[in-house]
Amino acid sequence: MLSDSCACCGQSGTDVPVSAIDRYGLPLDTVLCSGCGTLRANPYPDDDGLADFYTHHYQQMYARSDDRVAYFAKQRGYGQRVLEAVRSWLPEGAFVFEAGCGAGGALDVLRDGGYQVSGCDYSQELVDHGRTQGLSLHWGPPLAALESLPAPSLIYMHHVFEHVRDPLRQLEGLRDALAPGGKVLIIVPDVSRISEFPFPAGDLRLFLHIAHRFNFSLAGFRMLAARAGLEVESLQQRDANQSPEFWAVLTRRQGPVSAPDDLKAGRAMLDYLRRTERRWRMHLTRGQLLVLRQRIRSKLQRLLGRHDKPSVTTPTDAS
């Protein structure tokens, strides 16, 4: 287990304890950086421990891939979203790499869109399944896989970057692997809006678990990108299946990149989480109210459906 300072702003000694357990009630210390507002698990397993976890435990612990066919189809769903986001600027026939690709369902969509594709994952079973679909997939970490591949015009990570132990080193490696003019697309959960959506409906603990080391603040992510020599071309807050996420497109800069300095970001995030917890305990977050409205609507539809059914009468025997 390793302890370190905030990877986003580089500060140390400014951590605010947030939780001592994860969403399953298991011991996991989570702290909030008072400098940039990013949350992280600290201490955390080292690289060898993480490789073992993702190789032997992650897929089973989170019940993500028992049905390979269904999982592949589900991945195609977010692959379509990625394709729609990059189609306008990604050159025709460009090489695309996905870090943490699972079985490669999303890459299959991009391949259908005319792009050359490859990816990597720590699950050998999922990699093997993707290979049966004709995809070029690799087992292991992305920087190792990229060493033997052409320089990609797009590297993307869909709900994977929050898993990375050392995000600064990861971004620096991805930056160096890009083709000239290439871009990195990062898609992660957005902890700054947990009160607004049905999931997690304001319950921060649902965002805290061993697989997700980081919950990035927007300010912290901008600082991290700048430290890695990348410029944030766009950063969009979006909705994923009634849960908050943000999408960041990063480009490589030849010269130095000045890191933004938002001295109020940490305090703002801490105040938001405290305010959200108070409202959550009273069942008054917007997300909780949306869930309640959905349940009421569903019950009404079931009741009305029963009443709308034509009555069946039994014919009498007149004889």
Image (tube, helix red, strand yellow):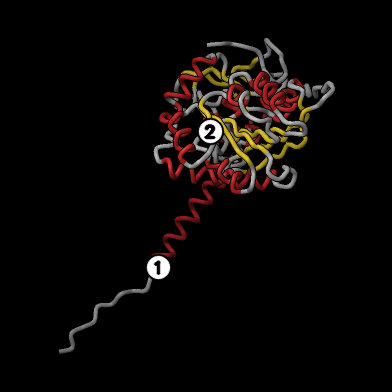
Q: Secondary structure at mark 2?
A: strand
Q: Which residue is mark 2?
A: 137
Q: Residues within 10 Å of mark 1 (few under 14, many from 20)?
A: few
Residue 287 appearing in the image: no
Residue under the point 42% across and 29% down:
61
> What residue sits 43% from the left and 32% below the top?
125
For this orientation, the residue located farthest to the left is 319
| Figure disc tally | 2
Residue 8, label in figure: none
Q: Nearer the viewer, residue 301 or 160?
A: 160
Front: mark 2 or 1: 2
Horizontally, is 4 left or right of 313 in the view? right
At mark 1, the secondary structure is helix
**Residue 212 position by quadrant:** top right
Mark 2 or 1 closer to N-term? 2
Q: Which residue is mark 1?
A: 307
Comparing 3 with 192, the one in front is 3
Relative height, residue 185 to residue 32 (above, below): below
The residue that appears at 51% across and 19% down in the rendered structure is 50
Q: Which amino acid type is marked by label 2?
A: Leu
Image side of residue 70 versus residue 76, left or right: left
Count neighbours of disc 2 (C-alpha within 10 A) and say few if under 14, some if 14 to 19, many if 20 or more.
Answer: many
| Amino acid at the residue labelled 1 | His
On-image quarter of the C terminus: bottom left
Q: Residue furthest right?
A: 255
